[in-house]
């Protein structure tokens, strides 16, 4: 999910990591932060199409580790 930076910065982050999927939730309202219990950045939470959480990284994380969690 993205919220703190601009949408363009979030898109650049994905591009720099070579990430095309999964989709990033863009939420400038921070409602998703409350829902998922995120208190700060960086954070990454992978959620499948059914809303099941697949992985969670709060604080600094390795992008490759996140990508390895993808089904």
Image: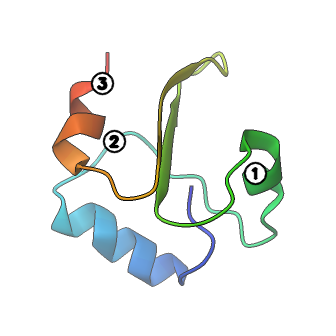
4 w.r.t. 38: above or below: below
- The circle on residue 32 is 1
Taking 60 as reference, is 7 above or below it? below
Q: Quadrant of residue 11?
A: bottom left
* 52 relative position to 5: left or right: right
> How many angstroms separate mark 1 from mark 2 (CA)?
19 Å
At label 3, counting other C-alpha atoms closer than 10 Å, the crowd grade (few under 14, some 14-19, many 20 or more) is few
**Residue beneath the point at 61% across and 65% down:** 40
Q: Say whether residue 27 is left or right of residue 1.
A: right
> Does dot 3 land on a helix, a strand or a loop?
loop
Disc 1, disc 2: CB below 8 Å?
no
Using the image as rendered, state which of residue 15 and residue 62 is in the foreground: 62
Contact? badges 3 and 2 (CB < 8 Å): no
Residue at figure coordinates x 70%, y 63% from the top left: 27
Q: Is residue 15 above or below residue 21?
A: below
Q: Mark 3 sits on what residue?
A: 69
Label 3 vs label 2: CA separation? 12 Å
Q: Name the spot of residue 17 as percent of width and height, x first.
A: 18, 59
The crowd level at tag 2 (other Cα within 10 Å; few <14, some 14-19, many 20+) is few
Q: Secondary structure at mark 1?
A: helix
Position of 57 with respect to 47 (left or right) is left
* Pointer 1 or 2: first along the chain: 2
For this rendering, which residue is in front, 28 or 42?
42
Colouring used for the render: rainbow
Quadrant in which the N terminus is drawn = bottom right
Q: As rendered, which of 14 and 64 lies closer to the eye? A: 64
Disc marking residue 54: none
Q: CA distance from mark 3 to mark 1?
A: 21 Å
Of marks 3 and 2, the one in the foreground: 3
Q: Which mark is residue 21?
A: 2
């Amino acid at each position: 999910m993205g919220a703190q930076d601009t949408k363009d910065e979030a898109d650049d982050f994905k591009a720099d990591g070579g990430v095309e999927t999964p989709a990033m939730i863009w939420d400038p309202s921070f409602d998703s932060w409350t829902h998922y219990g995120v208190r700060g950045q960086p954070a990454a939470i992978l959620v499948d199409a059914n809303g099941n959480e697949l992985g969670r990284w709060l604080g600094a994380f390795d992008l490759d580790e996140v990508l390895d969690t993808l089904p």
